[in-house]
């Protein structure tokens, strides 16, 4: 990054208090919900921890689906608060099987909460959200969904699907700031959140947020908001609304298909088939004779975004990022060029021209 003078970011005016409610309404529209939406003045991991901490108490039994470190953290937060947690782990780096979820719900009819991540940027997989939520609804189980990465990249219809709590962050598919997040809360969820062990006078308290912001007319946020984050979120939403959420999702699907068709033309081994993959990143399994660290060092060309996958079973995986503003033909082409260069550097020469032809074919449709 060039050495710039960032002093113009100092002495920022306060974000207008009357615009916080409008931000929440615009985020609700993206999630397609009429539920309450809370604005959290922190990165989405804190919002997720706030949900778990506000729900957790002795006597609460939860089925927590683990397909990445984020899911494991959520289960730990629930346990910390005294909840009885069943961590249902998928095969390393893979989506959860719907049959495994059904079996746990059948075996444990006293489960009252089910939590999962929608799309995993860690390994590029997509969990079967609608099917899982449908199973939970049939049994009266409250659902908590981490849609931090997926919002904007995948369809999310909170009210139609009947999801009770959703956590989103604008820094992934929405291409916004990382320092603010949001939580959608249904009436049924509010009823479960009201208990004697619920945290109060805490950044982790959803009840505090409800009383101090929702019930006071949704004016100025409690505490000391960081105006830069909210101005940035406002700008990101303006850009997204100008493009249209359907077009943004279509752009992510196109980038994913172009990336995967080009990788296949290079003879790369994709980690999961397209029906199990998210539109956010594409994970590739490296050949056994390639050192991942050396490969990534060679792949770090200007304009490319290729990194290591994260979590159990991912030690041989690399991720090509096509999330947010990187869901474009130019960014996809840069990633493919860098990937082919890194293969060549490791002694695996592949015809990059065929990969570019496959990429161009997708974008010419």
Image (tube, rainbow, N blue to C red):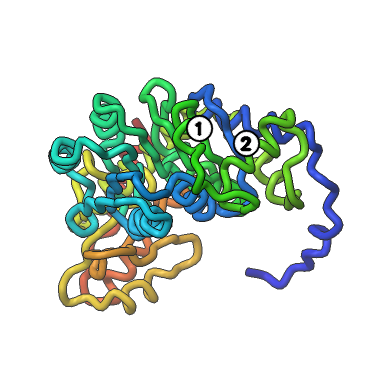
Q: Nearer the viewer, residue 150 or 242?
A: 150
Q: Which mark is drawn over residue 210?
A: 2
Q: Nearer the viewer, residue 137 or 270?
A: 137
Residue 325 shows in this picture: no
Q: Could you say where residue 187 lies in the image, as x and y percent from the top left?
A: 49, 26
Question: Which of marks 1 and 2 precedes in the sequence?
Answer: 1
Q: Which residue is mark 1?
A: 190
**Residue at the image position 74 percent from the left and 50 percent from the top:** 223
Dots 2, 1 in contact, CB < 8 A? yes
**Residue at the image position 75 percent from the left and 49 percent from the top:** 227
Q: Please tell me in which quadrant of the rendered image residue 278 appears.
A: top left
Q: Could you say where residue 112 lies in the image, as x and y percent from the top left?
A: 32, 37
Left or right relative to 103: residue 333: right
Q: Please tell me in which quadrant of the rendered image residue 220 appears.
A: top right
Q: Secondary structure at mark 1?
A: helix
Left or right relative to 151: residue 216: right
């Amino acid at each position: 990054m060039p050495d710039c003078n960032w002093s113009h970011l100092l002495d920022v005016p306060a974000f207008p208090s009357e615009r916080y409610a409008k931000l929440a309404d615009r985020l609700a529209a993206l999630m397609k919900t009429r539920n309450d939406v809370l604005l959290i003045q922190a990165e989405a991991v804190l919002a997720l921890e706030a949900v778990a901490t506000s729900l957790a108490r002795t006597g609460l039994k939860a089925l927590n689906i683990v397909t990445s470190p984020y899911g494991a953290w959520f289960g730990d937060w629930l346990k910390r608060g005294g909840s009885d947690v069943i961590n249902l782990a998928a095969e390393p780096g893979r989506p959860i099987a719907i049959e495994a979820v059904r079996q746990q719900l059948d075996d444990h009819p006293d489960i009252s909460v089910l939590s999962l991540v929608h799309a995993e940027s860690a390994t590029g997989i997509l969990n079967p959200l609608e099917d899982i939520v449908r199973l939970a609804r049939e049994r009266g189980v409250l659902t908590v969904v981490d849609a931090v990465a997926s919002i904007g990249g995948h369809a999310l219809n909170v009210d139609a699907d009947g999801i009770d709590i959703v956590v989103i962050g604008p820094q992934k598919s929405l291409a916004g700031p990382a320092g603010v997040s949001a939580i959608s809360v249904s009436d049924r969820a509010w009823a479960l959140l009201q208990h004697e062990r619920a945290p109060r006078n805490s950044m982790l308290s959803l009840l505090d947020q409800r009383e101090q912001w929702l019930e006071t007319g949704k004016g100025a946020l409690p505490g000391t908001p960081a105006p830069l984050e909210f101005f940035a979120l406002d700008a990101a939403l303006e850009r997204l609304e100008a493009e249209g959420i359907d077009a943004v999702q279509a752009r992510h699907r196109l980038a994913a298909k172009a990336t995967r068709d080009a990788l296949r033309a290079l003879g790369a081994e994709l980690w999961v088939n397209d029906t199990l993959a998210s539109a956010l990143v594409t994970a590739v399994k490296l050949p056994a004779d390639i050192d991942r660290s050396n490969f990534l060092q060679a792949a770090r060309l200007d304009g490319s975004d290729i990194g290591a996958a994260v979590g159990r079973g991912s030690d041989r995986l690399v991720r090509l990022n096509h999330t947010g503003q990187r869901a474009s033909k130019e960014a996809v082409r840069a990633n493919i060029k860098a990937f082919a260069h890194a293969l060549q550097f490791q002694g695996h020469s592949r015809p990059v021209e065929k990969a570019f032809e496959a990429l161009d074919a997708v974008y010419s449709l």
